[in-house]
Amino acid sequence: MKMMFKAFAKKLFGAKYESLTRSLLVYLLVFWGLYISDFRVQIALSVRCLMVSVFTAGVMWQALSSQDNAANMQNMFMLPFDRRKFVFSYVAALGAYTIFTKTAALLAVLWAVSLCSPAEILEDAVCAVHAILMAAAVYSFRKYWYAGSLWAAAAIAAILLFGNQPWFVWALIGNGILAVIFLQRADGYAFYSWDLPGGQKNHIIRGRKHYSVWRYLFRYLNCHKNYWINTVVMWGVALVLPFFFRQMGGLSAAPVCFAILSLNTPVCILLSCDPALQRAIWFLPGQEKAFCVPYCLFIFFCNLIADVVFLCSLQVQNGGVTVLSFSSAVFFALQSAILSVLLEWFYPIRNWQIESDLWRHPRKYIVPVILLLLAGAVGILPALMPILIILLVVEIVILLFLIWKRF
């Protein structure tokens, strides 16, 4: 079991566990910086337990669903293995990776700003381990998704209702033991998906006379349903943003909201998460224009839909949406698309372990931060808006010219 755990751990943390050391050092600095700032927030036990549990379970589920891990497991399946040792080694490695490189960031912030007692720190640790075990157990019998959904809903309801009770930590331990019992009965192959990504079955793809980057992008997203879910969630955020920004003056806060809505990570990392596609594009001549222009338009329309949803919600709640507001939405959506494609083309993310690393890479904040600074500049100097509109027209003309040259 120790050798199996090392095999999985070295793949996740690096040959010398350098990823683990680097992450813990960064989180220690974050904790110390927040702690000495004397910024304090009162957080209820049930809320903190829910935050830690949901975040850890979500990251663990993404790690279990990783295609890169599935490819690595194929090599492991070629060797004889003990079923229980394999399952617990795999879950322990992914659990350690999730807690020490992802959940530790959340815990560093919570422990620094809420001054937790040793008992509360212990409860947070129990919540994280419980979430790991429960996520792995539910994933192992995901064919019976309705049972897993009921179990997860019951756990969330119990945390909300009884999370403040001193005996609740024992309930989490008991539920964790139940998850261990389920894992003892699980098979190693239960953690490997035999289907194509996203559960798609093998099917015949009919030949077509002309290639289409758009067709490829939609097929890719159809094979990764969580990418669509993230996009739909952004549309839901666009619906409620006007309510939170109503006190800032509605339209004056619109550019800030457009910058926030550009934080749609999955559609902006398609080259980074598919190195084979990246190599194929770089190998063929003229692919900068053939791929980057449709990819830019794809991201642009995804962002623009979210911005239009925001403007419609803003019109219903506050009113006053004008043509200038829509022009601003088009401008910010296009800048987000152009900057995202440039980053993917010139600075793709490398040396990642599993797909969830891409979703949480610091690079995801570069484009939104640039747009936020631009939105702040527009708010301070409204005279900049006509200049930006002229820039928008120039960019649209260039895009139309590139599309015309392509055909």
Image: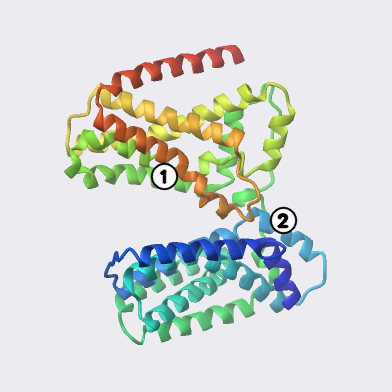
Q: Amino acid at mark 1?
A: Val
Q: State the quadrant of the C terminus.
A: top right
> On screen, 85 above or below 195?
below
Secondary structure found at label 2: helix
- Mark nearer the viewer, 1 or 2: 2
Above or below — where is 215 with respect to 197?
A: above
Name the element at disc 1: helix
**Label 1 Cα crowd, 10 Å radius (few <14 / some 14-19 / many 20+):** some
Determine the CA span between mark 1 and mark 2: 29 Å
Figure quadrant of residue 30? bottom left
Residue 228 lies left or right of residue 324; in this view the side is: right
Place of residue 372 in the rendered image (x, y in percent of width and height, measured from the top left):
35, 38
User: Which of the two residues, 257 or 73, is positioned nearer the viewer here?
Assistant: 257
Instruction: Tell me if residue 77 can be seen.
Output: yes
Using the image as rendered, state which of residue 80 and residue 324 is in the foreground. 324
- Residue 71, labelled with which disc? 2
> Badges 1 and 2: C-beta atoms under 8 Å apart?
no
Q: Give residue 166's mark.
A: none
Categorize mark 2 by other alpha carbons within 10 Å: few (<14), some (14-19), many (20+).
few
Which residue occupies the foreground of this view, 281 or 369?
369
For image coordinates 58% across by 78% down, the residue present is 182
Earlier in the chain: of badge 1 and badge 2, it is 2
Point out residue 366 in the picture as x, y percentages from the top left corner.
46, 41
> Would you say 278 lies left or right of 113 here?
right
Residue at image position (59%, 58%) is 65
Residue 232's label in the rendered image is: 1
